[in-house]
Amino acid sequence: MIPGPFTYHRPASIEEAVGLLVSLGEESRPLAGGQSLIPMMKLRMATPEHLVDLGGVAGLKGIDVEPGGIRIGAAVTQAQVIGSALIADRLPILRDAALQIADPQVRTRGTIGGNVANGDPGNDMPAVMQCLGASYVLAGPSGERSVAARDFYLGPYFTLLEPGELLVAVRIPLPSAGHGQAYEKLKRKIGDYATAAAAVILSATAGRIATASIALTNVAPTPLLAEEAARLVVGTSLDAATLKAASAAAKAIADPAADGRGTAEYRREMAGVMVARALVKAFGRVKGA
Amino acid sequence: MSETQTLPITVTVNGSKVQRFVEPRTLLVHFLREDLGLTGTHIGCDTSHCGACTVEIDGESIKSCTTFAVQANGSSITTVEGLANADGTLHALQEGFRQMHGLQCGFCTPGMLMRAKVLLTENPDPSEEEIRFGIAGNLCRCTGYQNIVKAIQFAAARLNGRTFQEAAE
Ligand SMILES: Cc1cc2nc3c(=O)[nH]c(=O)nc-3n(C[C@H](O)[C@H](O)[C@H](O)COP(=O)(O)OP(=O)(O)OC[C@H]3O[C@@H](n4cnc5c(N)ncnc54)[C@H](O)[C@@H]3O)c2cc1C
Ligand code: FES
Ligand code: FES
């Protein structure tokens, strides 16, 4: 399978990349790791006339600590996330999620920016970013703006990213030490997108959950923040009845399509199961409670 | 679109520098197989799943069916043709695949070898589980993987100066 013809551009800076995207217009697209875009182009489901390769753009790399959080450059690969000691220590949920994406070769090239900008409901990072309360830094012709991951996704492949805009970084507020984090993903095999998956971050004091955040992957046209489920677990010690209620609340907002992974009913049920498993795991990982 | 763009690229392939003009849409695997005649790198699924097209690029393993040749400009690529030692003897991995029967039809083998080579630089002495997770992007329709895992264990042992002892079944 051979992609349709396109013209290749290789800017060296963010300004140059944005300038190209603006002047080339709607038929241009950024090329990051290419691990979603190239397969789509080979199937001719995407036929951009211009690709703006981000591979040589300075200022998109690096995982840096900044006041209150961590900034991950858009071009940081999934493999680099897995290899980062800082992320393993402070944001283990990102590492857990990255390890469940595709396979080593795909993770070597696939980037965080591409994963969150893509807009495919099957992508794992968007729900993790919603769970973490992350925001995306978007560079456009009139400068930078910041959009919350919780507001960014409008529908499949439909996000708040405007034509001509480039996602340059993800900013993540650091949960204070002691939070429990977990990402539970049900998939049929390595390299498969989620049948259903759930991200959970929580804190506890004296054995009771003090704060909780829950988000779901691939059970709706966009990632979902499961606010009601999170509200239900706060103040509890995660007894069986609470787990059941939280699962039910997550299932109530899930709206999966039937596909090769199962019927809509099955996938909704699995959303509930993933939430329960992730809650138990995250609670078990809370330190010093 | 107006005229077809062609771009010059320079890459080092198996130690030799090559310069060619490519269309931007040329996939790295087609560049290797058709422009350079290096047909050891296979195309299995052509949908980014099977890993038969795996090559090493600047010390990392990637799927060459999911990379444009222009993206490889300036990099150093090793394909299965470049795996054997300079004196022509087999690389420890090739020896492992031979002695442990790590292949049947051989179609997946170039990709397995190239992935395993990078795996052993990332993790020189992997456990069986780490080997299986490390080659999870490479599919084999014949062997059932058991002997591929043994072949990689054989190579790891040899590269670490040990002799491979097969675990009792
Ligand atoms: C076999 C296989 C299995 C996979 N399994 C999973 C999985 O289980 N979970 C998962 O999450 N992903 C999976 N993926 C997808 C993979 O994670 C991709 O790497 C990721 O979705 C896109 O990142 P990329 O860097 O490759 O982006 P690209 O493919 O280069 O780009 C994807 C899209 O985002 C746009 N884009 C990229 N970067 C930017 C930017 N900085 N600003 C604005 N727009 C941008 C591009 O224009 C394009 O439209 C899989 C891929 C393969 C091949
Ligand atoms: S041919 Fe490239 S992954 Fe199958
Ligand atoms: S030996 Fe036949 S596919 Fe692996």
Image (cartoon, rainbow, N blue to C red):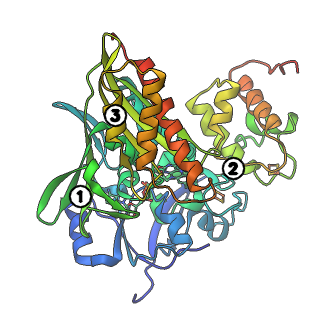
Q: Position of residue A215 (x, y in %)?
A: 38, 41
**Which quadrant of the figure has residue A203?**
top left
Q: Residue A201: image x %, image y %?
A: 35, 30
Residue at left offset 35%, top offset 51%: A113
Nearer the viewer's eye, disc 3 or disc 1? 3
Chain letter, disc 1 residue: A
In this rendering, position of residue A137 left or right of residue B54: left
In contact (CB < 8 Å): disc 1 and disc 2: no
Identified by mark 3, the residue type is Ala
> Horizontally, is A253 left or right of B14 in the view?
left
- Mark pair 1, 2: CA separation: 35 Å
Which residue is farthest left? A142
- Using the image, name the chain to which the residue with label 3 belongs: A
- Mark 1 crowd level (few <14, some 14–19, many ≥20, 10 Å Cα): some
Examine the rendered structure and indicate whether residue A19 appears above or below residue B92: below
Q: Helix or strand or loop: what does disc 2 sit on? A: helix
Pointer 2: what residue? B111
Which amino acid, mark 2?
Answer: Gly
Would the CB of label 1 be found within 8 Å of ligand 1? no
Q: Is residue A215 above or below residue A96?
A: below
Numbered circle sitting on residue A13: 1
Whether label 2 lies within 8 Å of ligand 2 gets the answer: yes
Q: Quadrant of residue A212?
A: top left
Quick one: SS at disc 1? loop
**Callout 1, which amino acid?**
Ser
In terms of secondary structure, where does tag 3 sit? helix
Whether labels 3 and 1 share one chain: yes
Question: Alpha carbon of mark 3 to alpha carbon of mark 1: how far?
Answer: 41 Å
Residue B127: x percent and y percent? 67, 23
* Residue A238 shows in the view: yes
Same chain for mark 3 and mark 2? The answer is no
Sequence-wise, the earlier of marks 3 and 1 is: 1
